[in-house]
Image: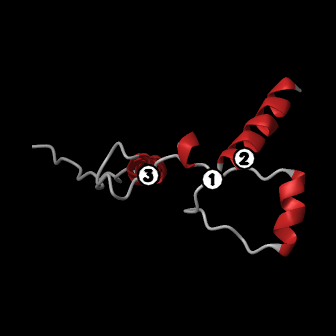
Amino acid sequence: MAQQKKRAPARRKKRHWLIPKILLVCAYGVVIAFLGTIFVMRKELRRLGVFGNERTAVSPASPSQALPVPSPEMARQGETASPVSPTAEVTQEEKKQLEDILRARSGK
C-alpha cells in the first residue's frame, strides 16, 4: 500500500475587522443622535406647552397684557417722576395718547 503524505495544516485566513468596526461606530453615532433629537424635541414641545405640564409652558404675551409704549413727552416726564407699576390703571387721557401714537406708527 502506498503511504499517503500528511498535508501541512492549512493556514486560516485572517479576518479583517475594519469594516465591522466602522459600521459599529456609525451605529453608535446614529443611536446617540437619535436620542439627542428626542430629548431636544421633548424639551421644545414642553416649552411650547404641547407635551407635559401646562404650568411649565411659556405662553406668549397677549396684546391686552402688553405694557404701553410711552411717548417722548411721557418719557421726559418719566425721568423726574417715579416709575409706574404695571398694575396701575391707565387713565382715559393716557389711553388716548397711546392710541394716537399707534395710529401715527401704523400710518408710516
Q: Which residue is mark 3?
A: 47
Mark 2 neighbour density, 10 Å: few (under 14) some (14–19) many (20 or more): few
For marks 3 and 1 on the same chain, the one whose residue lies earlier in the sequence: 3
Q: Secondary structure at mark 2?
A: helix
The residue under label 3 is which amino acid type? Arg
Q: Secondary structure at mark 3?
A: helix
Q: Secondary structure at mark 1?
A: loop
Give the foreground label among 2 and 1: 2
Q: Is residue 77 above or below residue 64?
A: below
Mark 1 neighbour density, 10 Å: few (under 14) some (14–19) many (20 or more): few
Give the foreground label among 3 and 1: 1
Q: How many marks?
A: 3
Quadrant position of residue 36:
bottom left
- Please provide percent x and percent y for residue 46: 38, 51
Please tell me which residue lies in front, 31 or 24.
31
Left or right of 42 on screen, residue 77: right
Q: Residue at x 63, y 53 (%)?
A: 90
- Please provide percent x and percent y for residue 4: 18, 47
Q: Which residue is mark 2?
A: 93
Which quadrant would the N terminus be assigned to in this image? top left
Could you tell me if the residues under marks 3 and 2 are in contact, i.e. CB atoms within 8 Å? Answer: no
Please tell me which residue lies in front, 96 or 98.
96
Q: How is the image coloured?
A: secondary structure
Q: Which residue is mark 1?
A: 90
Q: Which residue in the rendered view is the most extreme toward the left? A: 1
Q: How far apart are labels 2 and 1 at the CA level? A: 8 Å
Q: Which residue in the rendered view is the most extreme toward the front? A: 92
Which quadrant would the C terminus be assigned to in this image? top right
- Please provide percent x and percent y for residue 42: 38, 50
- Please provide percent x and percent y for residue 76: 90, 63
Q: Residue at x 44, y 52 (%)?
A: 47
